[in-house]
Image (cartoon, rainbow, N blue to C red):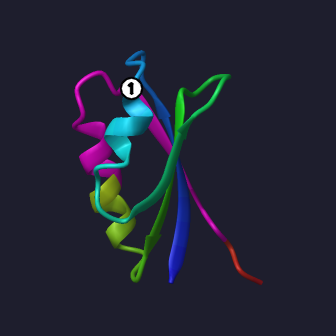
Amino acid sequence: MVRAVILVKSPKKLIAARLRKISNITESFPVSGQFDAVAVIDVTELSEIKNITTEIQKIPGVERTETMVEVNP
């Protein structure tokens, strides 16, 4: 299992709720600071992260994303 955190910049107030509708997003919540929402995803293959990130970027109002993949020692 691969876990990643995707930070989302969007002026839309309900972006966190919209993110929850995407498959493989296990958690989503609004945050303060440079980004507006966080999405936590769990996938079986590292390559799946790109597909989910692309889907997020297609949401109207999403300005940018930043993805961080969990590293297990």
* Residue 49, percent from left and from top: 39, 64
Query: What residue is shown with label 1?
Result: 14
Kindly identify the residue that appears in the image at 39 percent across and 30 percent down. Answer: 15
Residue drawn at x 77%, y 84% is 73
* Residue 28 position within the rendered picture, expressed as x and y whole percent measured from the top left: 49, 46
Query: In the image, what residue occupies the spot 39% across and 26% down?
Result: 14
In the displayed structure, would residue 45 be above or below residue 33? below
Judge left or right: residue 7 versus residue 57.
Answer: right
Taking 19 as reference, is 1 left or right?
Answer: right
Name the residue at the top extreme: 11
Q: Residue furthest right?
A: 73
Res. 25 image quadrant: bottom left
Specify whether 46 is left or right of 62: right
Residue 61's spot in the image, x, y percent? 30, 21
Instruction: Tell me if residue 14 comes above or below residue 6 in the rendering.
Output: above
Magenta segment: does it hold 64?
yes
Query: How many numbered circles does the render carry?
Result: 1
- The range drawn in magenta is 53-70
Query: Left or right: where does residue 49 sit relative to residue 1?
Result: left
Instruction: Give residue 48's position: percent from left, percent from top.
Output: 33, 70
| Residue 59 included in the magenta stretch of the image | yes
Where disc 1 sits, the SS reads loop
Q: Nearer the viewer, residue 73 or 30?
A: 30
Residue 13 in the image: above or below residue 67: above
Q: Amino acid at mark 1?
A: Leu
Q: Residue at x 64, y 68 (%)?
A: 70
* Other residues around mark 1 within 10 Å, as few (<14) / some (14–19) / many (≥20): few
